[in-house]
Image: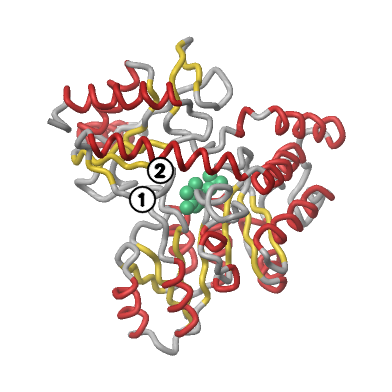
Amino acid sequence: MGKNEMFSEKLQQIQAAGLYRRMRYMQSQQSAHVMIAGEDYLMMSSNSYLGLCSDERLKQAAQEAIEKFGTGSGGSRLTTGSYELHKQLEEEIAAFKGTEAALIFNTGYMANLGIISTIADKNWVIFSDRLNHASIIDGCRLSGAEIVVYEHGDMEDLEQKVEKYRGKRGLLVSDGLFSVDGDIAPVPGLVDIARRYDMLLMVDDAHATGVFGKNGGGTADHFDLPEGVDIMVGTFSKALASEGGFVAGSRDLVDYLVNRARSFIFSTALSPASIAVSLAALKIVQTEPQARETLLTNARWLRQELCQAGFQTWNYPTQIISVFVGRPEVAVAFSERLMERRIFVSAIRPPTVPEGTSRLRINVMATHTKEDLTRAIITIKDVGSELGVIA
Ligand SMILES: *Cc1c(COP(=O)(O)O)cnc(C)c1O
């Protein structure tokens, strides 16, 4: 077998299963409309929920930081890559989350990998929601701990499983807002079980940060339970329109991670420009709640219209709308036909979601206009009937 034959064989299998993926290249900034191959697309798959990726104030913040501090950070955080800006951002996150301290990682993915594998080892048991994000799953695997998966959002199932491991060091981990189904985790239930069984609770609010909670602080803020969650993870890469992950928690937790988390220690620090954008975005989400209200109003309307048209969706009050179509080929065809009509909607297939639940995932933005959404509804209905997804 030639060195590359293995790859082409594997690729053929992926293609035959309808699971082949490829990239599309933007020629414009990320906003409610994007340019691809010279054409204007209505963007309905962006994680820039508040439309901040194209915000002039954030661009300005990046430019000023570049002027003052240059481009790259020049080293890892423990060597030469820590700037006053990093410290300032960590203090702001701690205040935003109501914790003693916070720590920035280069991505949300690296945060989960580093945090979970630092805290837990083979003497621990980790209870993980079935639909947790891949970065949580990978962090769990890397830790070497025993992993117990409980049914999605099912507190009864969780408690039955936890009961069997009494006496063992436990970490309970969940997405705050699940990107696959678009539902919010039962945080009060998680807090209750973590307390009663003396486990650490970690909630990853990648999609909820800047969107839920009265200050945009995420799901703990939404449920008004900031003290119940020991380890609050989030990312700057979604609603906050920047890049980087973070964790907020106790001073000791943060110090321990600084000293032990390999994905923190062995990677070059984020550039000053990224940090400056995160700082500016954090300020915007805390002072401009209107944007998240508009976002959720837009989402509510779109979801309702799609439901009425006969599409199968969950009825969750979030900005992520999953439209179930079943087979991966149908999801891909649906997405492609929408693309032909210049609406950008991604098909989500296994292994991101369980077999038989392929879907379109629609991400609403605060900057979608009534006109944008009306066009989306009409087009999605048209394609849905063409493909027999709706009657
Ligand atoms: C997107 C996401 C991440 C990864 O964050 P990045 O900053 O994009 O690496 C982690 N966890 C969850 C739940 C996510 O949705």
- Say whether marks 2 and 1 touch (CB < 8 Å): yes
Tell me, for residue 345, which label it has, or none. none
Tell me, for residue 316, which label it has, or none. 1
Residue 3 x/y as whole percent: 36, 34
Label 1 is placed on what type of residue?
Answer: Tyr
- Residue 116 against residue 358 in the figure, above or below: below
Tell me how far mark 2 sits from mark 1, CA to CA: 8 Å
The residue lying at 79 percent from left, 54 percent from top is 87
Category of crowding for the residue at label 1, using alpha-carbon neighbours closer than 10 angstroms: few (below 14), some (14–19), many (at least 20) = some
Q: Is residue 323 visible?
A: yes
- Dividing the picture into quarters, in which one does residue 298 lie? top left
Q: Nearer the viewer, residue 225 or 31?
A: 225
- Dividing the picture into quarters, in which one does residue 129 lie? bottom left
The residue lying at 22 percent from left, 37 percent from top is 311
Q: Nearer the viewer, residue 13 or 58?
A: 58
Residue 138 x/y as whole percent: 45, 57
Q: Is residue 6 visible?
A: no
Label 2 is placed on what type of residue?
Answer: Ile
Residue 208 x/y as whole percent: 51, 51
Q: Quadrant of the C terminus?
A: top left
Horizontal relation, residue 333 to residue 189: left or right:
left
The residue wearing badge 2 is 320
- Describe the element under mark 2 as helix, strand or loop: strand
Category of crowding for the residue at label 2, using alpha-carbon neighbours closer than 10 angstroms: few (below 14), some (14–19), many (at least 20) = many
- Residue 6 against residue 379 in the figure, above or below: below
Labels 2, 1: front one? 1
The residue lying at 32 percent from left, 42 percent from top is 322
Q: Nearer the viewer, residue 285 or 329?
A: 285
- Describe the element under mark 1 as helix, strand or loop: loop
